[in-house]
Amino acid sequence: GAGVSQSPRYKVAKRGQDVALRCDPISGHVSLFWYQQALGQGPEFLTYFQNEAQLDKSGLPSDRFFAERPEGSVSTLKIQRTQQEDSAVYLCASSSSDTYEQYFGPGTRLTVT
Amino acid sequence: GDSVTQMEGPVTLSEEAFLTINCTYTATGYPSLFWYVQYPGEGLQLLLKATKADDKGSNKGFEATYRKETTSFHLEKGSVQVSDSAVYFCALSDKAGANNLFFGTGTRLTVIP
């Protein structure tokens, strides 16, 4: 079946621009996670949704980062006024309530110039 | 807070050599432990997991044992293949996998024929 998909796969933004990254989780998966992976590092947690409720946003690095999942399915991570330090791969993962195993998407590589 | 310390890479081995990648963790409570693998050009995939002390996770010839007394979850494989070349991430979750993952920095493995 279809896995987690993310779009765009690559995004180049000029410093100060706003970007929106999309995640389509596996159908029926209740939980959705966003992670940020800097070059040569492991992924770091940003935020977590259970259905449409954002239960944990403790990892968002600043108030320029905002995530939503209005209908409990597709999620969007928005970054306002991008900075160079925002350059990273942004990973989305989803999981069901049965196994809790997280399935990851291919990521969106964001480069801020 | 929760954290994972992973053996620094890169690691280069000849085909059929024995592999160990060390991983230790710090966590409150009783975390679940995971190894994820990222093959070139692909997304993160769960390789194996263990949810309680003394559990052994295994998959594709890889094994790791959850050692509470040494807070470790070392990854081993008896005979590596060229196709095992990838980046390996140790990770933990502090609520039976239902919550966000804390990742190590990753270890790049290259297997040469």
Image (cartoon, rainbow, N blue to C red):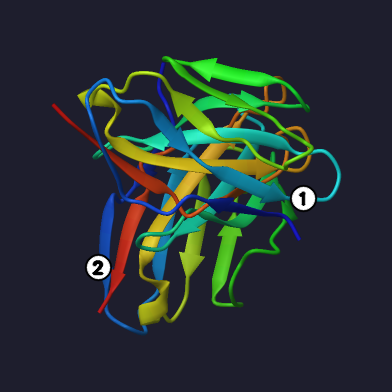
What residue occupies the far right of the structure in this picture? B29
Picture mark count: 2
Q: Is residue A22 left or right of residue B35?
A: left
Nearest to the observer: residue B45 or residue A67: B45
User: Could one spot residue A82 in this view of the protein?
Assistant: no
What number is the disc on residue B45?
none
Q: Is residue B109 left or right of residue A72?
A: left
Query: If the image is split into quadrants, where does the C terminus of chain B sit?
Result: top left
Residue type at tag 1: Ala
What residue occupies the far left of the structure in this picture? B113
Residue type at tag 2: Val
State the residue position of label 1. Answer: B27
From mark 1 to mark 2, how far is it between C-alphas? 37 Å
Q: State which chain disc 2 sits on.
A: A
What number is the disc on residue A12?
2
Closer to the eye: label 1 or 2: 1
State the image coordinates of residue A89 (x, y, percent, origin top left).
38, 57
Q: Is residue A41 left or right of residue A52?
A: left
Nearest to the observer: residue A53 or residue A84: A84
State the image coordinates of residue B45 (x, y, percent, origin top left).
44, 31
**Who's the residue at 21% across and 26% down the image?**
B82
Identify the element where label 1 is drawn.
loop
User: Could one spot residue A108 in this view of the protein?
Assistant: yes
Binning the other alpha carbons within 10 Å of mark 2 as few (below 14), some (14 to 19) or many (20 upward) gives few
Query: Which quarter of the figure has residue B23?
Result: top right
Q: State which chain disc 1 sits on.
A: B
Identify the element where label 2 is drawn.
strand
